[in-house]
Amino acid sequence: MSTLTDTRSSLQWTCELPDENATCAFARHLADLLFPGAVIGLIGELGSGKTFLVRALASALGTPDSRFVNSPTFVLIQEYEGRWPIYHFDTYRLKHLRDFVDLGVHEYFRGEGVCLIEWADRVQAVLPEERLEIRIEITGPHSRRLTLTAFGERYVQLVKGLQQTWASFTEQKHTSSAEQAAAEQVFE
Ligand SMILES: Nc1ncnc2c1ncn2[C@@H]1O[C@H](COP(=O)(O)OP(=O)(O)OP(=O)(O)O)[C@@H](O)[C@H]1O
Ligand SMILES: [Mg+2]
């Protein structure tokens, strides 16, 4: 189930993910619509699935071994190879906003890679105005609710595209499971 709210320069969409497979499928759909220079802020409590989503996105973007995608203890930024360079920031242990800026984040944001920032709410003040924000809520042991907020026209278009491809993907899934259930009934 999902809801879509449209305003002039931003757009919000909520998407329910029943299990980890759904999160991986969601990441594949999102990766297909990303562009070089995209900035995505991830927000959610400990263990909500920020790193899981980064790993799934990196894998969908062609990172050779996404097992290396984790939350490092001492490093603020990790880089992975992919269709474009992927810059993974984890600001959990950040003490001062200045340290984040001193990493040269503005260069990364202006670059040709894809920037994925965990705990984006901690560094909101220095994030680009135009970006995608993904808020993750834990709704059950395996389920998550994602609330996407697009800031700026490019991200609004991205979320609109994602909403469409996701709707046809989930419809197809429902149709094929209904067909499978009907077939199972025939053979019972
Ligand atoms: N539908 C789901 N989508 C994503 N993760 C899920 C889902 N269901 C269960 N999980 C589990 O939730 C956990 C999420 O852990 P992860 O390290 O990604 O969280 P995090 O938000 O990055 O935490 P931290 O703030 O500590 O960095 C994983 O163990 C993952 O297997
Ligand atoms: Mg994490």
Image (spheres, rainbow, N blue to C red):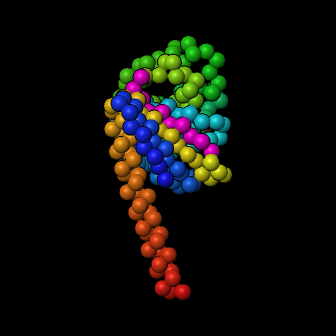
**Residue 33, image x, y percentages:** 35, 42
Residue 98 point in image, percent of width and height: 56, 13
Residue shown at 37%/51% (left/top)? Answer: 165
| Residue 136 among magenta residues | yes
Report whether residue 161 is seen: yes
Q: Nearer the viewer, residue 65 or 135?
A: 135
Residue 83 appears in the rendering: no
Report how many numbered discs are placed on residues in the image. 0
Quadrant (top left/top right/bottom left/bottom right) for the C terminus = bottom right
Name the residue located 42 percent from the left edge and 40 percent from the top edge: 5
Q: In this view, does 120 lie above or below 67?
A: above
Of 66 and 109, the residue lying toward us: 109
Residue 131 occupies quadrant = top left
Residue 85, compared with residue 123, is above or below; it is below
The magenta segment is: 129-138
Q: Residue at horizontal 65%, vertical 51%?
A: 140
Instruction: Return the x and y of residue 90 as percentages of the image width and height.
Output: 57, 29
Where is 182 relative to 75, above or below?
A: below
| Residue at image coords 62%, 45% | 138
**Left or right side of 86 for 42:** right
Q: Kindly report the secondary structure that dominates the magenta region of the rendered protein.
A: strand
As drawn, 157 above or below 129: below
In the rendering, at what x and y percent does residue 51 appear? 57, 39
175 or 29, nearer to the observer: 175
